[in-house]
Amino acid sequence: MISKIEISDRRFPLGHGAGSDAIHRDPIYSYAVTQLHDDSGIIGTGFAFTLGEGNDLVCKAAQFYADQLRGKDIEELMADFGNTFNQLSNEQQFRWLGPHKGIVHLALASVTNACYDLWAKKRQVPLWKLLIDLTPEQIIQTLDLSYLEDELTKEEAIALIKSNGADKELRKSILQKGYPGYNTSIGWFNYPDEKVRENVAKAVGEGFTAMKLKVGSKDFERDIRRSKMVREVAGDGVKIMLDANQQWTLPQALKICKQLQEMDPFWIEEPTHPDDVLAHKVLADSIAPTKLALGEHVPNRIIFKNYLQSKCAGFMQVDAVRVGGVSEFITVSLLCRKYNVPVVPHVGDMGQLHQHLVLFNHISLGHEALFLEHIPHLQKHFVQPVRIEEGRYITPQEVGSNCDLK
């Protein structure tokens, strides 16, 4: 049973323009870390991701949630985790601080992710292995489908998983090939042009076939020039994504996205305020067939449902350290599968956790193995860092979710 709880505030300054975008100019990559100690000596580690200030507040909230799990057996807990998730996320006083968003939901993600890590370690398997071996019924028992009944009942969710089971064994070939990655670090916002050029050439040489440039400058011409520069260096065979990090108003986005279409972006990401579903719908219709990607700042399954219902997102970037952890990530992935919208997670945690979840998405849910974001800046701080070869994530074989920090 869970006998001891440790919460820690871990912060890692980046420097040299790394991690910068149109909104976040000097981020400090930070984790609110939850460690659940089992009385057998196993420690489950989970975290939520922030950019520095406020990380201590997330830690405080995580302590509150984790304390509710003290004395519980991990197998019994996970056998009905959907109910536990529902109870924690709707705790009558804490819910006022959300609901299901902000500091309290980030804290729940940290605790939830620690539960899944402890579960996999207890069973002595990697998290991806634990997840793909669960029956559809067992998977659904770990999820909270409340407020989704108009789109996805428990029975419909089980049927959806079963319907994608026919080719499950064939899709396991991804375990040998490795999951494709894409490089975000070629074009951080504060990087000068020459560094971006060098990074693009280096990424192509390392086998990456997709990469992302940060845009959203007050000088629109800078974005257009740099996007064309990346296309020129990378060549026509490379997928290039553009990420505005919510910088534009809708009128601005309508204007500049039309111009950015000239360099054939694979997607345009977070073009405007993440809560404005209708603005994204207007923009998506205006710039079709160019697609929008969003989800980095979408906090819960209900808002993801609304985006899917509006049919304005070409790619969903649900992040398991942003929504309520692995449980809600899988819930959103199921919704996306129903709508046939690819899931390409936002990776603020360098893919340590998400490398497991995209394997589950592909093998068990039938999602396309498109690619997974790769950000290398915190790699040295992990006990078992992700491995990338020729632009592909090498399937992790260690038990757990690879989230243990040094």
Image (cartoon, rainbow, N blue to C red):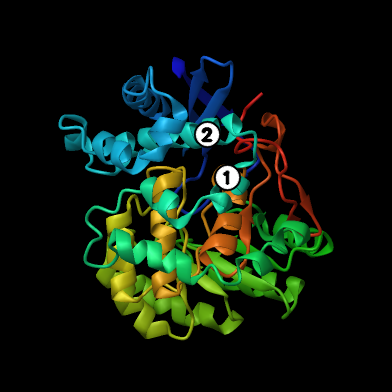
**Residue nearer the viewer, 113 or 224:** 113
- Side of 20 where 141 appears, left or right: left
The N terminus: image quadrant: top left
Dot 1 crowding, Cα within 10 Å, few <14, some 14–19, many 20+: some
**Residue nearer the viewer, 16 or 124:** 124
Q: How far, Cα to Cα, is label 2 from label 1?
A: 8 Å
The reply to whether dot 2 and dot 1 touch (C-beta < 8 Å) is yes
**Residue nearer the viewer, 180 or 280:** 180
The residue carrying mark 2 is 119
Task: Identify residue type, mark 1.
Answer: Leu
Q: Answer yes or no: is residue 385 visible.
A: yes
Residue 382 x/y as whole percent: 67, 31
Dot 2 crowding, Cα within 10 Å, few <14, some 14–19, many 20+: many
- Side of 376 where 249 appears, left or right: left
Residue found at x 32% / y 35%: 103
Judged from the image, the secondary structure of the residue bearing numbered disc 1 is helix
The C terminus: image quadrant: top right
Residue 302 x/y as whole percent: 27, 57
Residue 146 x/y as whole percent: 24, 52
Residue 393, placed above or below residue 17: below
Task: Identify residue type, mark 2.
Answer: Trp
Residue found at x 23% / y 40%: 98
Residue 33 x/y as whole percent: 49, 27
The total number of labels drawn is: 2
Residue 182, placed above or below residue 397: below
Judged from the image, the secondary structure of the residue bearing numbered disc 2 is helix
Residue 130 is tagged as: 1
Q: Answer yes or no: is residue 53 visible.
A: no
